[in-house]
Image: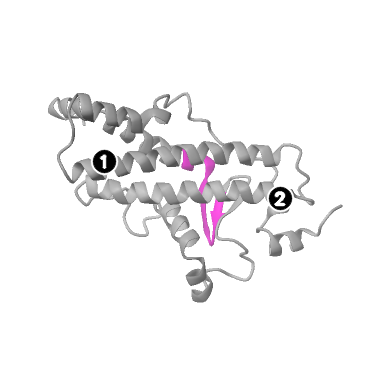
């Protein structure tokens, strides 16, 4: 059975009939400690040294969000590729599609929370400036639209052709007038993960700071 692409766009997601491929980088080999960040952080704090209060709480929150984002990204990657494998674009597997979308939404939300925590750790200096168009700002805005879809509908930011606040395209994840490519999503995750790698061991990070390496 084949559906009219306009019907699919209206009732599932914009451009779903044209969604046929996705090149999503795999970062698991680059960050082999990612599954263990939280455990490593506990052991290093308990057995070596720990951050002072307030920093201690925010660093742990950041590491958790980084871990969640890393997991969500790779789960989203797997589900997206599984959806595309053998899919018929004009008779899409709706359940599999929305499973992948949900994981990309979770990735965006976890990254947005990590960005908020990074701003605190970086003494108020964020990962982007307001409306600067950077990949970080665009992904942060997509996360806000996922959280506040009804508000976007009321304000008119969500147009008649926009069915969901996040959908998948060959070049990346899209929202109302926004796109973050899969390459950009991986670059954001690389930055978030590199910092989590550092924060998992307070003693090593403090030594790095003393040496002027951070």
**Residue 95 at x, y percent in the picture:** 69, 50
Residue at left offset 41%, top offset 30%? 34
Give whichever of 68, 86 is nearer the camera: 68
Secondary structure beneath disc 2? helix
Residue at left offset 31%, top offset 35%? 195
User: What label sits on residue 166 in the rendered view?
Assistant: none
Q: Is residue 182 magenta?
A: yes
Give whichever of 115, 75 is nearer the camera: 75
Residue at left offset 31%, top offset 55%? 129
Q: Is residue 109 left or right of residue 176?
A: left
Q: Which residues are magenta?
A: 173-186
Q: Is residue 211 left or right of residue 20?
A: left
**Residue 131, visible in the rendered structure:** yes
User: In the rendered view of the protein, which quadrant contains the C terminus?
Assistant: top left
Residue with the mark numbered 1: 59
Secondary structure beneath disc 1? helix
Vertical placement of residue 205 versus 187, above or below? above
- What is the residue that sits farthest to the front in this orientation? 46
- Circle nearer the N terminus (2, 1): 2
Residue with the mark numbered 2: 18
Q: Quadrant of residue 141?
A: bottom left
**Residue 86 at x, y percent in the picture:** 76, 38
């Amino acid at each position: 059975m084949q559906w009219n692409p306009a019907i699919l766009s209206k009732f599932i997601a914009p451009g779903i009939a044209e969604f046929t491929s996705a090149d999503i980088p795999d970062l698991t080999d680059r960050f082999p400690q990612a599954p263990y960040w939280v455990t490593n952080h506990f052991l290093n704090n308990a057995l070596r040294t720990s951050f002072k209060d307030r920093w201690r709480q925010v660093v742990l929150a950041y590491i958790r969000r980084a871990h969640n984002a890393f997991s969500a990204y790779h789960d989203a990657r797997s589900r997206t590729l599984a959806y595309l494998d053998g899919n018929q674009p004009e008779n899409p597997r709706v359940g599999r599609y929305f499973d992948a979308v949900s994981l990309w939404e979770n990735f965006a939300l976890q990254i947005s929370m990590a960005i908020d925590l990074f701003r605190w750790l970086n003494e108020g200096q964020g990962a982007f400036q307001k409306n600067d168009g950077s990949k970080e700002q665009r992904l942060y805005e997509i996360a806000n639209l996922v959280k506040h879809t009804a508000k976007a509908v009321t304000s008119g930011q969500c147009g008649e052709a926009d069915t969901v606040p996040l959908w998948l395209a060959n070049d990346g994840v899209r929202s109302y007038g926004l796109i973050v490519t899969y390459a950009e999503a991986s670059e954001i995750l690389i930055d978030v993960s590199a910092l989590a790698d550092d924060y998992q061991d307070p003693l090593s990070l403090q030594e790095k700071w003393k040496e002027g390496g951070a």
